[in-house]
Image (cartoon, rainbow, N blue to C red):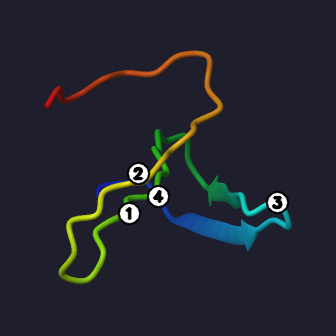
């Protein structure tokens, strides 16, 4: 994938009792490198167009990349 050396990436997914999905990423490398670990999710129901999803991201800033 273009990294300057081996990289070991782990993702831990946990569903908390409060119903929150908790995702923790870790990565170890042998050489200094940049990595951007993230999740992509499709929130479309099978054949339905009932888009009533809510997403809360606990962040102080964000970068808007597309405006629809």
Instruction: Say which of 67 and 2 sits in front.
Output: 67
Q: Earlier in the sequence, mark 3 or mark 2?
A: 2
Report the residue that reaches farthest toward the right: 17
Closer to the eye: label 1 or 2: 1
Q: Residues within 10 Å of mark 1 (few under 14, many from 20)?
A: few
Secondary element under disc 2, as helix, strand or loop, is loop
| Quarter containing the C terminus | top left
Instruction: Say which of 29 and 63 sits in front.
Output: 63
Instruction: Say which of 40 and 10 sits in front.
Output: 40
The span from disc 2 to disc 4 (Cα, nearest Å) is 4 Å
The span from disc 4 to disc 1 (Cα, nearest Å) is 28 Å
Q: Is residue 2 left or right of residue 62?
A: left
Q: Residues within 10 Å of mark 4 (few under 14, many from 20)?
A: few
- Which residue is found at the position 63% from the left and 67% from the top? 11
Q: Which mark is residue 5?
A: 4
x, y percentage for residue 42? Answer: 32, 65
Which residue corresponds to mark 2? 4
Compared with 47, 49 (above or below) is above
Closer to the eye: label 3 or 2: 3
x, y percentage for residue 13? Answer: 67, 70
Which residue corresponds to mark 1? 41
x, y percentage for residue 27? Answer: 63, 57
Which residue corresponds to mark 3? 18
Q: Residues within 10 Å of mark 3 (few under 14, many from 20)?
A: few
């Amino acid at each position: 994938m273009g990294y300057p050396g081996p990289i070991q990436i782990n993702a831990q997914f946990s569903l908390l009792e409060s119903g929150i999905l908790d995702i923790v990423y870790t990565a170890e490398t042998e050489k200094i490198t940049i990595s951007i670990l993230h999740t992509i999710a499709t929130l479309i129901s099978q054949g339905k167009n009932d888009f009533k999803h809510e997403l809360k991201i606990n962040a102080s800033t964000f970068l808007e990349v597309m405006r629809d």
